[in-house]
Image (cartoon, rainbow, N blue to C red):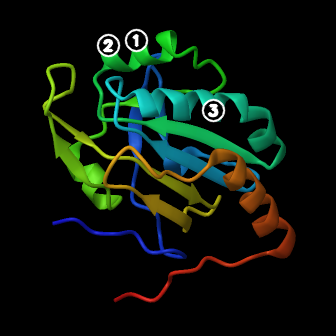
Amino acid sequence: MNTKPMPDGPAPSLELQLTDGTTWSLDAQRPESFTMIVMYRGKHCPVCEKYLKTTQTLADRYEELGVSLGPVSMDDLERAKDSKEEWGIDRFPVAYGMREATALAWGLYLSDSIKDEEPRRFSEPGLFLVRPDGTLHYAAINSMPFGRPDLEDMADAIEFVLEKKYPARGRVAA
């Protein structure tokens, strides 16, 4: 069953291996404002490549806003390392090996492979802002690679949220 984490509620647990051999844990993050988790489909996705390259280009702006960046996929180590290297991602760590149960806990959609270069199963994209106290402030979940939040707009939105102390929205459970 797919669930959705609720804004102002606790973000689901997230602990994954990084391509450099270390472990990344959401609980251990201490950003000034937010941890921005960019859940991407994997190495097979050219839209993901463009999205992470744009994230890399905006890394300084996000850093100025007190945002730590964390891209995550269900790819295995080899595919994650290849993506990091081939896409030129060197400004932030890349986590891999997210399990289906974890993807579902974050409310992500799952897809089965339709092409040889795709993994058997992978998550569709999501972008989350998690506060330093581990509560969710913002979530954007997609069922396809298209239509993700524009990353420049997201930086502007974070700046607005911080300046105006804008609260999380969408807190009413259906």
Q: How many marks?
A: 3
What residue sits 44% from the left and 33% below the top? 47
The C terminus: image quadrant: bottom left
Marks 2/3 in contact by CB < 8 Å: the verdict is no
Q: Position of residue 94 (x, y in %)?
A: 49, 27
What residue sits 63% from the left and 61% below the top? 131
Marks 1/2 in contact by CB < 8 Å: the verdict is yes
What residue sits 50% from the left and 63% below the top? 139
Please state which amino acid type lies under the numbered disc 1. Answer: Asp
First-in-chain label (2 vs 3): 3
Real-space Cα separation, disc 1 to disc 3, in angstroms: 18 Å
Real-space Cα separation, disc 1 to disc 2, in angstroms: 6 Å
Please state which amino acid type lies under the numbered disc 2. Answer: Glu
Residue nearer the viewer, 34 or 27: 34
Q: What element carries label 2?
A: helix
Q: Where is residue 14 in the image (x, y as percent from the top left)?
A: 40, 48
Q: Where is residue 13 in the image (x, y as percent from the top left)?
A: 39, 54
In this picture, is 66 found above or below 164?
above
Is 143 on the left or on the right of 120, as rendered?
right
What residue sits 31% from the left and 54% below the top? 143
Q: Is mark 3 on a helix, strand or loop?
A: helix
Q: Quadrant of residue 41?
A: top left
Which residue was labeled with disc 3?
Answer: 54
